[in-house]
Image (tube, rainbow, N blue to C red):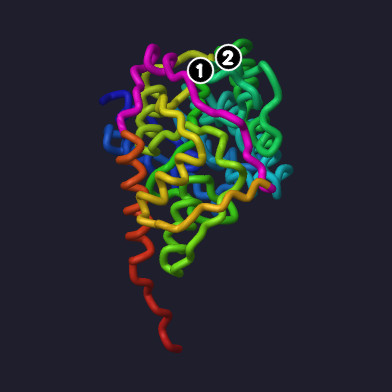
């Protein structure tokens, strides 16, 4: 417990989908000093804001998960923004953390950093064997450069930093905006709205043939904190569940979970993204004892239930002025 209570933490992105799960578990472990820099107060793309965070919190450990993220549509629409914002936030923060004497820097990377045609299951040594899938390459490469930076700083300065590669995440508090969301929240929302309208069909992107692996957000948060405490090596580490599912099967599974009985129409004019995606998580098990514990059916049911509860939550009417 002393590791958590005696260190001061900064968690960038700590108010977001994954970040809130990490912060909750940090506090449950006994962490007393946790700063979550909000983007409204600290624009981490700017040098001034990075310095302000470090001077305000004086952290021992930084968990960096702030990112500009989205699904295939968002990545295609904003590739420059996804590249620049993610690179600048991470690169400046890591550099100034080293200069400030931060004891440990934890970078949350992305499975999008892997080459488009990586042998399945993805192993960490395959990261440099090709170019990422084109629709999310700017995002994936920006995050991948933080791995390069971290290893360079470890080699030259002895800076303790680690790099984690979580697979696709899902769970309560995810982003359900159809313009920017990932596949699971997008499909949950589409099916619920179609059911409410009485629509007899829902359109899904692509062909349904690609595969994905999904990790429940609470499991990902646990893996991050286990690595934060126990892992001190610059070599990257996958965080995954070990379960691969096709987008077609995923879509049908979500429809059943929601209770939607209409047809699914596949729009093959939309991109499929990476053909297959599933991780080898043996390094995480070996080095810091992480194994995902939430069965996909259970995690999906909790995600659907959370979103339905959010929809049912009454809104406070604006006062008459």
Q: Are marks 2 and 1 in contact (CB under 8 Å)?
A: yes
Locate the N terminus and report the quarter of the image it occupies.
top left
Q: What is the count of numbered marks?
A: 2
Q: Which of the two residues, 89 or 259, is positioned nearer the viewer here?
A: 259
Q: Is residue 53 visible?
A: yes
Q: Is residue 174 found left or right of 265 in the rendered image?
A: left
Residue occupying image coordinates x 63% and y 39%: 272
Residue occupying image coordinates x 36% and y 61%: 310
Q: Quadrant of residue 98?
A: top right
Q: Is residue 149 found left or right of 225 in the rendered image?
A: right
Q: Where's residue 280, x and y in %?
A: 47, 19
Q: Where's residue 88, x and y in %?
A: 67, 37
Q: Which of marks 1 and 2 precedes in the sequence? A: 2
Q: Is residue 22 visible?
A: no
Q: Where's residue 235, x and y in %?
A: 53, 14
Dot 2: what SS? helix
Q: Which mark is residue 154?
A: 2
Q: Where's residue 62, x and y in %?
A: 48, 31
The boundaries of the magenta stretch are: 269-294
Residue 73 is inside the magenta segment = no
Q: Residue furthest bottom?
A: 321
The crowd level at tag 1 (other Cα within 10 Å; few <14, some 14-19, many 20+) is many
Query: Can you say whether 34 is above or below 148 in the image?
Result: below
Whole-angstrom CA distance, mark 2 to mark 1, is 6 Å
């Amino acid at each position: 417990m002393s590791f958590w209570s005696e260190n001061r933490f900064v968690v960038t992105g700590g108010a977001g989908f994954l970040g809130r799960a990490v912060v909750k578990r940090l506090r449950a472990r006994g962490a007393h000093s946790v700063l979550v820099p909000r983007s409204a107060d600290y624009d981490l793309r700017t040098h001034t804001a990075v310095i302000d965070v470090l001077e305000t919190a004086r952290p021992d450990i930084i968990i960096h998960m702030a990112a500009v993220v989205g699904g295939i549509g968002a990545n295609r629409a904003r590739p420059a923004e996804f590249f620049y914002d993610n690179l600048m936030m991470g690169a400046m923060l890591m550099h100034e953390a080293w200069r400030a004497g931060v004891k440990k820097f934890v970078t949350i990377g992305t499975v999008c950093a892997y080459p488009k045609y990586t042998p399945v299951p993805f192993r960490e040594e395959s990261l440099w064997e090709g170019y990422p899938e084109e629709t999310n390459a700017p995002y994936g490469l920006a995050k991948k450069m933080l791995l390069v930076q971290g290893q360079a700083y470890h080699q030259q300065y002895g800076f303790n930093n680690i790099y984690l590669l979580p697979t696709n995440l899902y769970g309560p508090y995810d982003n359900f905006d159809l313009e920017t969301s990932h596949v699971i929240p997008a499909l949950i929302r589409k099916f619920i709205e179609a059911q409410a309208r009485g629509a007899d069909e829902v359109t899904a992107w692509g062909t349904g043939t690609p595969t994905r692996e999904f990790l429940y957000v609470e499991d990902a948060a646990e893996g991050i904190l286990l690595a934060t405490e126990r892992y001190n090596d610059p070599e990257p580490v996958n965080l995954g569940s070990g379960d691969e599912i096709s987008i077609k099967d995923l879509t049908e599974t979500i429809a059943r979970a929601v209770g939607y009985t209409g047809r699914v129409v596949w729009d093959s004019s939309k991109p499929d993204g990476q053909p297959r995606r599933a991780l080898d998580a043996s390094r995480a098990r070996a080095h810091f004892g992480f194994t995902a514990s939430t069965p996909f059916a259970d995690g999906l049911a909790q995600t659907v239930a959370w979103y339905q509860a959010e929809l049912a939550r009454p809104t406070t009417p604006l006062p008459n002025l």
